[in-house]
Amino acid sequence: MSRRILIAEDEPSILVSLQFLLRLPDYEVRVARDGDEALRLVRSFTPHLVLLDVMMPVLNGFQICERIRENPAWKEIKIVMLSARGRESEVDKGLALGANAYVTKPFSTKALLAQVRELLAPPR
């Protein structure tokens, strides 16, 4: 079964890296470069997982996370927040808003891929 992943990231180099990392046969990946586009794709694409940059144009990652969690139809969407800001207060805010994980940049691609696989694994 194909798993749908939305990458919401405005930094081109990180975006290319994430797209390359997730080029696997069982993943269908879409990209949003700002917060408004990310929400539109959540509505139309309904991803299983969102890799969500915190600092994005139009709407930031915290706002997007909050809007996803407000909609009961999207309660199963997994959210991994990505940010260069790793202060405890920001991590706590992301997790309190409903993110499943908060990863600070720069990140290990191997560790991030393992986390994505774990979040997308069928329940045991």
Image (spheres, helix red, strand yellow):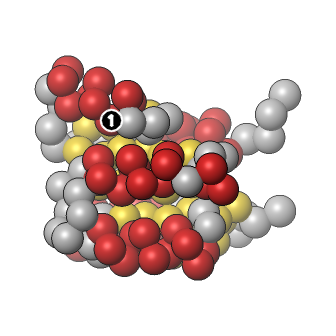
Residue at the image point whose x is 32% and y is 35% from the top: 94
Residue 52 location (% of width, % of height): 37, 54
**Residue 40: quarter of image:** bottom left
Image quarter of the N terminus: bottom right
Residue shown at the point (20%, 70%) measured from the top left: 58
Residue 117 picture location, percent across and down? 63, 43
Locate residue 107 relative to residue 75 in the image: left or right: left
User: Please, which residue is most extreme toward the top here?
Assistant: 88
- Regarding residue 96, the answer to whether it shows in the image is yes
Report the front residue among 108 and 9.
9
Q: Nearer the viewer, residue 56 or 31?
A: 56
Kind of element beneath mark 1: helix
Residue 106 visible to the viewer = no
Q: In the picture provided, is 89 more to the left or to the right than 115?
A: left
Q: Is residue 74 above or below residue 107?
A: below
Q: Position of residue 3 (x, y in %)?
A: 70, 61
Quarter of the figure with residue 93? top left
> Looking at the picture, does residue 75 appear above or below residue 104?
below
| Residue nearest the observer in this picture, 25 or 82 | 82
Q: Please state, as top left, top right, bottom left or bottom right, where the C terminus lies in the image.
A: top right
Q: Provide residue 4's location: percent of width, then percent of height.
A: 64, 65
Residue drawn at x 27%, y 72% is 34
Horizontal placement of 58 versus 33: left or right?
Answer: left
Residue placed under numbered mark 1 in the picture: 94
How many labels, in total?
Answer: 1
Report the amino acid beneath label 1.
Gly
